[in-house]
Image: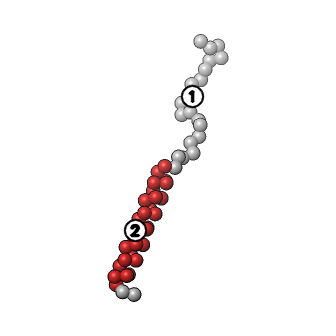
């Protein structure tokens, strides 16, 4: 295999790897995490009310 062909294949493989990693990072950043629907602060109410 000539050096030029080996260099071209290396560049193509590196480019494909970089593009795949970029798409993976974007997919991870756009994924919404599962968040429980529980409030952080709760207020107790008196049974007498106001």
The label shown at residue 17 is none
Query: Residue 2: where, in percent of width, then height?
Result: 36, 86
Q: Nearer the viewer, residue 49 or 27?
A: 27
Q: Is residue 15 left or right of residue 44?
A: left
Task: Give the crowd class for mark 1: few <14, some 14-19, many >=20 residues within 10 Å.
Answer: few
Residue ID at (40%, 72%): 12
Tell me the residue that label 1 is attached to: 42
| Displayed quadrant of residue 19 | bottom left
Coloring applied to the structure: secondary structure
Element under label 2?
helix
> Marks 1/2: CA distance?
52 Å
Residue 47 lies, with reference to residue 29, above or below; the image says: above
Precedes in sequence: disc 1 or disc 2:
2
Element under label 1?
loop
Q: Nearer the viewer, residue 36 or 48?
A: 36
Q: Is residue 35 left or right of residue 1?
A: right
Residue ID at (49%, 54%): 27
View extreme (left): residue: 4
Residue ID at (59%, 37%): 37
Query: Residue 35: where, in percent of width, then height?
Result: 56, 42
Q: Nearer the viewer, residue 36 or 32?
A: 32
Of badges 1 and 2, nearer the viewer stands 2
Query: Residue 32: where, in percent of width, then height?
Result: 53, 46
Residue ID at (59%, 12%): 50
| Displayed quadrant of residue 13 | bottom left
| Displayed quadrant of residue 25 | bottom left
The label shown at residue 15 is 2
């Amino acid at each position: 295999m000539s050096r030029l062909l080996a260099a071209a294949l290396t560049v193509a493989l590196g480019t494909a790897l970089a593009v795949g990693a970029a798409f993976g990072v974007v997919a991870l950043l756009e994924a919404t995490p599962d968040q429980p629907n529980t409030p952080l602060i709760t207020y107790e109410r008196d049974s007498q009310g106001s």
